[in-house]
Amino acid sequence: MTSLTSVVLPLLRHQLSRPLPASTRRFSSAMALNGKIKPAARVAGRRQDVWSIINEAAAASPVQPIVNMGQGFFGYNPPDFILNAAKDALNRVECNQYSPTRGRPRLLKAIADAYSPFWGRKIDPNTEVTITTGANEGMLSAFMAFIEPGDEVIVFEPFFDQYISNIEMPGGKIVYVPMHPPASGATETSSAGEWTVNFEELEKAITPKTKMIVINTPHNPIGKVFRKDELEKIADLCVKNQIIILSDEVYDRLYYVPFTRIATLSPEVAKLTITVGSAGKNFYATGWRVGWLLGPAELIQYVSAAHTRICYSSVSPLQEACAVGFEQAEKEGFWDASIADMKAKMNRFNQIWKELDLPYSEPEGGYFVMVNLNKVQLPEDYPFPPHVADRPRDFKLAWFLIQEVGVAAIPPTEFYTDDNAKIVEDYLRFAVCKPDEVLETAKERLRGLKKYIKH
């Protein structure tokens, strides 16, 4: 089987190697000479991102097809009851036209009904829920709704990289608070829950300009589920300082330890909390781009206003399919099966780290595992390309794995600031949301690391 990147990238390189038409060359020259025509600072001057580096490495690897355990997309379809709902929706005229900007009424009601039991009260689908074009656009809408130039937003490291650009768009200033791995992370396997927040560091990060804090539980990439007492400490600081909590809970149906939703701690906390959800993560359909935000009407009305200005409304037939997903999930036993299936995949894949005696963080939720490869000795004269050679060790590890064993993983220093990148430079993140046969192929290939492991 040929990987998509192995087909697309050569074609792209061919197109890029062709000479530009004269008109285009003239326009390019004009742009270079005219200082007025330049990109905004928020998108200019960025170094090559991790996704393009890993995908290009995968396309160029001599080991093909690559086993891609990097990006967190599923290697299998949603269940039939959800796929059939999407197909049925495509046959209905109203499902192929604009949806109301806040979302289709059926999906709003289905989400409110699904989450009301967790909240311990009836959620109003008309005022406390809004549908967005994926969770990422939902978070952008939240930032656009409340962040003005100079407002500060606290983000824990490691962070989902999209947080950063989304906060920068409205002119927000990001204040980083690092999470710390267990001291024995390089030598012993331990729970992802042992990655900790230093609450003194968190409190010092709060200033009069702090407008919002972003939390992510279950956490990407660590796999940590924040304990109730940890969330209470965060919530107390937010109530005391009147800070909006943006709680990214897109993996909220994949948890293997007790899971607390921060909005449910108290009415005072609920008033400050916007909860982010994702049908793509819930229903194995990351390409559908259906997300939502839950929160008090006083906050959601402004998020909805921002969403309207960003993309007006979200994909109609897929909203209808997601509504059916929520309506039927319990009856189909889907939620319990999702947890059991993903936990089984996690256990299956992590056997290889036990075999290689490489420590990892046992995930408490989600579908990523962080593995410490401190024991892997990279050859001193290995020919890393310049754009990898000047990055931290985890980028070199990722490149090496792709080139030598044919397995792609993500270097997590991309999710830290440069000052704190050293915290995770020996780790790689692997996504296990793949078919079992892919996991077995990955394990077989990763055995090729044995000769590079120092003892």
Image: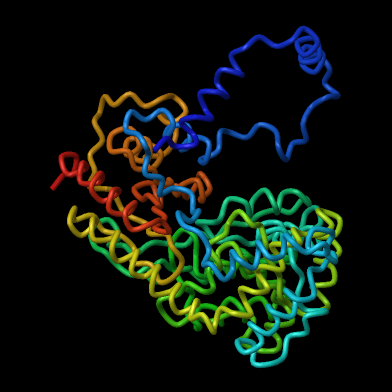
- In the displayed structure, would residue 35 be above or below residue 369? above
Q: Residue at x 70, y 11 (%)?
A: 20
- In the displayed structure, would residue 219 be above or below residue 170? below
Q: Which one is nearer the viewer's eye here, 219 or 82?
A: 82
Q: Residue at x 52, y 74 (%)?
A: 253
Q: Which one is nearer the viewer's eye here, 152 or 428?
A: 428
Q: Quadrant of the N terminus?
A: top left
Position of 89 compared to 187: left or right? right
Q: Would residue 351 be seen by someone viewing this image from the given angle?
A: yes
x and y percentages locating residue 340 in the rendered image: 39, 74
Q: Residue at x 74, y 54 (%)?
A: 172
Position of 252 compared to 324: left or right? left
x and y percentages locating residue 415 in the rendered image: 51, 50
Q: Which one is nearer the viewer's eye here, 404 or 30?
A: 404
x and y percentages locating residue 232 in the rendered image: 56, 82
- In the displayed structure, would residue 171 be above or below residue 126? above
Question: For the view shown, which residue lies furthest in the left direction?
Answer: 455
Q: Residue at x 67, y 62 (%)?
A: 290
Which color scheme is applied?
Answer: rainbow
Q: How many marks?
A: 0
Question: For the view shown, which residue lies furthest in the front direction?
Answer: 91
Q: Would residue 204 be seen by someone viewing this image from the given angle?
A: no
Residue 103 lies in what quarter of the image? bottom right
x and y percentages locating residue 45 in the rendered image: 66, 31
Position of 336 compared to 109: left or right? left
